[in-house]
Image (spheres, rainbow, N blue to C red):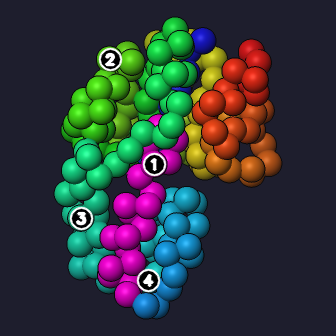
Amino acid sequence: MNILWDFDGTIFNTYPAYTKIVKEVLEDRVTEDEIYKLLKVSFSHALKYFNLTDEKEIYIRSRVRELKPDDLYPFPHVEDILKNANKNVIMTHKEREDVINILTFHRLEHYFVDMVAGDDGFPRKPDSASYKHLHDKHRIELAIGDRELDIIPAKQLGMKTCLFQNNTVGADFYLNDYKDFNSVIKL
């Protein structure tokens, strides 16, 4: 099976670290749970929702880039899926250098044959250009993401979709834990 993966919140559990950074800036204005829920829609959505100054937005984004690979953890059992797939590719809004550093630190880089990163010049999701690029090269059968934004382009291209830790209507499959992958995903 050839799989297209989102990165943040899908391969790596990055949102808790992002939530803490945003909470530092907002202090007691909002709970971590509220921040987390808004970040799961999208990082940009959360920052707009809180109506932050440009300076605070720049600060948050720079703090996120300063996170070390050992501050972020892959989800349990994700490596089992990666090693059993025929091909794995990534489509992320995160900068390429950051993704490579994190994957390398956690010894997961060898599982991926290709990537479109946020600094590669493609339009942002839900535009399907990056998905089409990866699909044309690798014949993707399944796209896995943690947000509706991650499956919209895949659906437009006729790929099967899976939402991870998200029950929004519209995906072909739903997973809350990667240990259940083989019992849930049937292509």
How many C-alpha atoms fall within 10 Å of the one at disc 1: few (<14), some, or many (≥20)?
Answer: some
User: Which image quadrant is residue 25 in?
Assistant: bottom left
Disc 1 or disc 4, which is closer to the eye?
1
Give the side of residue 68 with respect to residue 17, left or right.
left
Across and down, in percent, residue 64 comes to 28, 60
How many C-alpha atoms fall within 10 Å of the one at disc 4: few (<14), some, or many (≥20)?
Answer: few
N-terminal of the pair, mark 1 or mark 4, is 1
User: Given contact means CB atoms under 8 Å apart, are the residues at marks 2 and 3 in contact?
Assistant: no
Give the side of residue 95 with respect to residue 81, left or right.
left
Residue 103 in view of the camera: yes
Q: Secondary structure at mark 4?
A: loop
Location of mark 4 (residue): 51
Tell me what residue is drawn at x 64 percent, y 48 percent: 165
User: Could you say which disc has been placed on residue 110 in the image?
Assistant: 2
N-terminal of the pair, mark 2 or mark 3, is 3
Location of mark 1 (residue): 13
Which residues are drawn in magenta?
Answer: 9-27
Q: Secondary structure at mark 1?
A: loop
